[in-house]
Image (cartoon, rainbow, N blue to C red):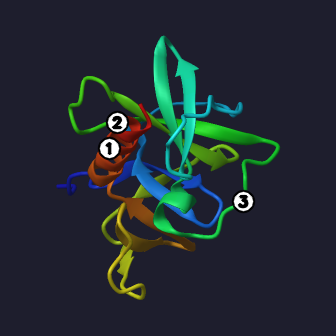
Amino acid sequence: MSSPQTDIRGVLINVGGGRLLLPNASVAEVISYSEPERLDGAPEWLLGAARWRGWRLPVLSFPHLVGWPAERAQLGAKVAVLKALGGNPRLPYIAVVSQGFPRLVSVSRERLVVVDDIGQPPLGVQARVQLGEDVAVIPDLLTVELLVDEALGEAA
């Protein structure tokens, strides 16, 4: 009798100063980067808004949000459109600038190890993990969504 499959499909997204690890199902689409429309009064990490399938998406720099050193979007940059989890009808998606295409990975309990070397993770980070050779952070998407919603309210 075989054991149930416990692997999930994940996505590693390069975001300048590090990598994000997300469930594959949370990524709606990956699109080419174009300079977002600037939002007056928005924090530096909220780069602006981009149009996608009739939506006006907030585009954020995850490294700027969590205080990592980060460069501006480079040639070949992409935007990962993420499905929001908070149920806010005004914010069904958020977009994160990615350096290149995200990479699909298989995530199993045996291969995923929490790395506890950063102490208290920064706001917006749930945990730092190692998956095989890759070190990444698991973002706290609900907190990120709340921060984006708050910033959009202040920028309006």
Q: Amino acid at mark 1?
A: Glu
With respect to residue 28, does 6 lie above or below?
A: below
Read off the residue under disc 3.
71
Disc 2 crowd, CA 10 A, few/some/many (<14, 14-19, 20+): few
Q: Position of residue 43 (x, y in %)?
A: 50, 50
Q: Which is more N-terminal, label 1 or label 3?
A: 3
Closer-to-camera residue (95/156): 156
Residue 55 position within the rendered picture, expressed as x and y whole percent measured from the top left: 45, 17
Which mark lies nearer to you, 3 or 2?
Answer: 2
Q: Residues within 10 Å of mark 1 (few under 14, many from 20)?
A: few
Which image quarter: residue 34? top right
Q: Check the picture and name the quadrant holding the N terminus.
A: bottom left
In the rendered image of this protein, does residue 54 appear above or below residue 20? above
**Residue 111 showing in the rendered view:** no
Q: Which quarter of the figure is the C terminus placed in?
A: top left
Q: Amino acid at mark 3?
A: Glu
Q: Do labels 1 and 2 touch, CB within 8 Å?
A: yes
